[in-house]
Amino acid sequence: MNNDLSLISLILDASLVVKAVMLMLLVASIASWAIIIEKSRLLKRATGAADEFEETFWSGSDVSEIYRELADSDESQVGMAGIFESGYREFGRLREDRAINAEQIVEGSRRSMRVSQVREVERLEQNLAFLATVGSTSPYVGLFGTVWGIMTSFQALGNVQAATLALVAPGIAEALVATAMGLFAAIPAVIAFNRYADIVGRLEVRYDTFAEEFSAILQRHAAHLYRAAP
């Protein structure tokens, strides 16, 4: 049994099962960090876009002018702008139909915005479940590697007449590396999941609030159209 307790030696001298566990945890950790970085950028852009659109929307600009600017843009609208665009587009389509009343027009616009909001929240929540899974299972996967490594070490000690700390220490140390790697993979994933889930939840509330406020505006517009109709 190797008495070199350097980290590289501990990993290289580990049993095949423990090495497989370490490799699995390393892959999970790399994937988690890739998601953490990408999700951080996505949520930052989504929050900034919501702030920018709310500022434009409540600045007193005409909603039809805002819609034309968004419709003429080459980029597909997401977030709050996408919710607004889908709602106003449905409002414009339904108000051409004189067979339906103002309440039906507003309800159709509200449903369109709700669908757009659900899609946006799904986009923001994408891969959060993976972070939750890594955060909840990695410590147990690492613990399995540790238990297996310690068991293998004690089985090897059965072939010697006198067991000393020098013989036991390397095997236990290399097994404990698996637990350390499990925690290394789990802790950032748990922190990121909790933080990002909170941000997504707050954005969802903002989207829902905006949709209700915009529905009230559309309701006033629809009522005005029907009062003005001959």
Image (spheres, helix red, strand yellow):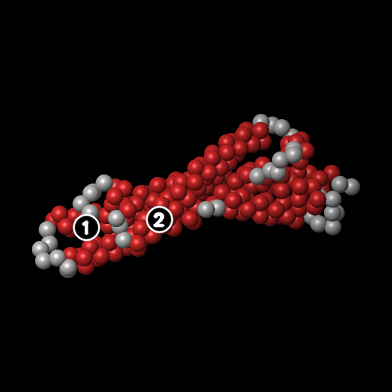
Which of the two marks, 1 or 2, is nearer to us in this view? 1
Indicate the position of residue 219 as horizontal and vertical percent values. 72, 47
The part of the image, by quadrant, that contains residue 101 is bottom right
Please state if 49 lies on the left or on the right of 149 as rendered.
right
Q: Residue at x 37, y 55 (%)?
A: 22
Question: Mark 1 — residue?
Answer: 1
Give the total number of marks visible in the rendering.
Answer: 2
For the residue pair 104 and 205, the one nearer the viewer reads as 205
The part of the image, by quadrant, that contains residue 71 is top right
Packing grade of label 1 (10 A; few <14, some 14-19, many >=20) is: few
For the residue pair 190 and 177, the one nearer the viewer reads as 177
For the residue pair 53 and 101, the one nearer the viewer reads as 53
Residue type at tag 2: Leu
Q: Secondary structure at mark 2?
A: helix
- Name of the residue lying farthest toward the right: 230
Indicate the position of residue 8 as horizontal and vertical percent values. 31, 48
Q: Residue at x 81, y 50 (%)?
A: 93
Q: Residue at x 10, y 63 (%)?
A: 162
Residue type at tag 1: Met
**Mark 1–mark 2 CB contact (< 8 Å):** no
Q: Secondary structure at mark 1?
A: loop
Observer able to see residue 210: yes
Question: Mark 2 — residue?
Answer: 23
Please state if 43 lies on the left or on the right of 136 as rendered.
right
Q: Quadrant of the N terminus?
A: bottom left
Indicate the position of residue 183 as horizontal and vertical percent values. 34, 52
Q: Disc 1 and disc 2: Cα gap in Å?
A: 22 Å
Q: Please, is residue 30 above or below residue 55 in the view?
A: below
